[in-house]
Structures are given as C-alpha cells and as structure tokens.
Image (cartoon, helix red, strand yellow):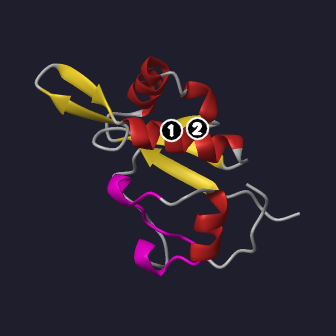
Amino acid sequence: MPLPLVVYVDVDDTLVRHAGTKRIPIPSTIAHVRLLATAGAEMWCWSTGGKDYARSMAEDLGIADCFVGFLPKPNVLIDDQSVSEWRQCVEVRPGALGTGINDYGERIGRPATND
C-alpha cells in the first residue's frame, strides 16, 4: 500500500486573508483542503503564528476535522538537502491549486490512486 500524500497547509494568505481586523476566508483553498482530506491525504495545518493559532483558524473555518494535527512553522530547518531538492515534494501556491490527490501524485512521480 502506498504512503499517503502528506500535505502541509499554511493559514495566513493561504486559508484566510487579513484586511485590518477582518479575516476573509479563501473559499477555493478551503474547498481544496476538504477535497484532499476526503481523498485520503494526510493533512497538517501550520502557521508562523503557532499551532494554537493554526488550530483556532481551522476551527473558525470549519475545517479542523480535515487535519491530523497543527504545527508552528519552523524557524530553523536542519536537513542535508534544501527544500527545493526534496524528492517527491511540490510547492503549490493558493492561486495554482491542483485538481486533486492524483494531480499532486503525478507531479511528484507517484501512480494515481482513485480520487
């Protein structure tokens, strides 16, 4: 059985935008998170605001159940490779979301599942 597609989702300017004190949800990313979670991706929500902030925002958006956990974004990443060199990893901007779990699988060289 292949490993699940592991997806890390940022909060600010990915799930929500901020305009002064207003939070404006980004519907396309929120729907995409639901799509990937339903298709079996292992979803993690993270933020430079910390794990409690990430959890709180996901709860406010009604998508906390899509995530297996909440994390702060790292300040230091110690690895023998730069992120751009990671095998089977693709960076996706909110304005260029894929079509689903199979799309991302193809981008990283994995066979299709059945989404």
**Type of amino acid at the residue the image marks with label 1:** Ala
Residue 2 to residue 20: above or below: below
Marks 1 and 2 in Cβ contact (< 8 Å): yes
Segment tinted magenta in the rendering: 82-97
Residue nearest the viewer, comparing 52 with 26: 26
Separation of marks 1 and 2 at Cα, in angstroms = 5 Å
Residue 94 within the segment the image draws in magenta: yes
Residue 83 to residue 46: above or below: below
Residue 60: mark: none
Could you tell me residue 74's position as x and y percent?
39, 51
Q: Tag count in the figure?
A: 2
SS of the residue under disc 2: helix
Residue 73 to residue 53: above or below: below
Q: Is the magenta region chiefly helix, strand or loop?
A: loop
Label 2 crowd (10 A; few <14 / some 14-19 / many >=20): some
Label 1 crowd (10 A; few <14 / some 14-19 / many >=20): few
Could you tell me residue 89's position as x and y percent?
54, 70
Could you tell me residue 103's position as x and y percent?
60, 66
Image-based side of 110 in relation to 35, left or right = right
- Is residue 97 something that shows in the picture? yes
Residue 38 to residue 113: above or below: above
Q: Quadrant of the N terminus?
A: bottom right
Residue identified by numbered label 1: 31
- Is residue 82 something that shows in the picture? no
Residue identified by numbered label 2: 34
Residue 28 within the segment the image draws in magenta: no
Q: What residue appears at the point 42 percent right and 62 percent down from the top-left corner?
A: 92
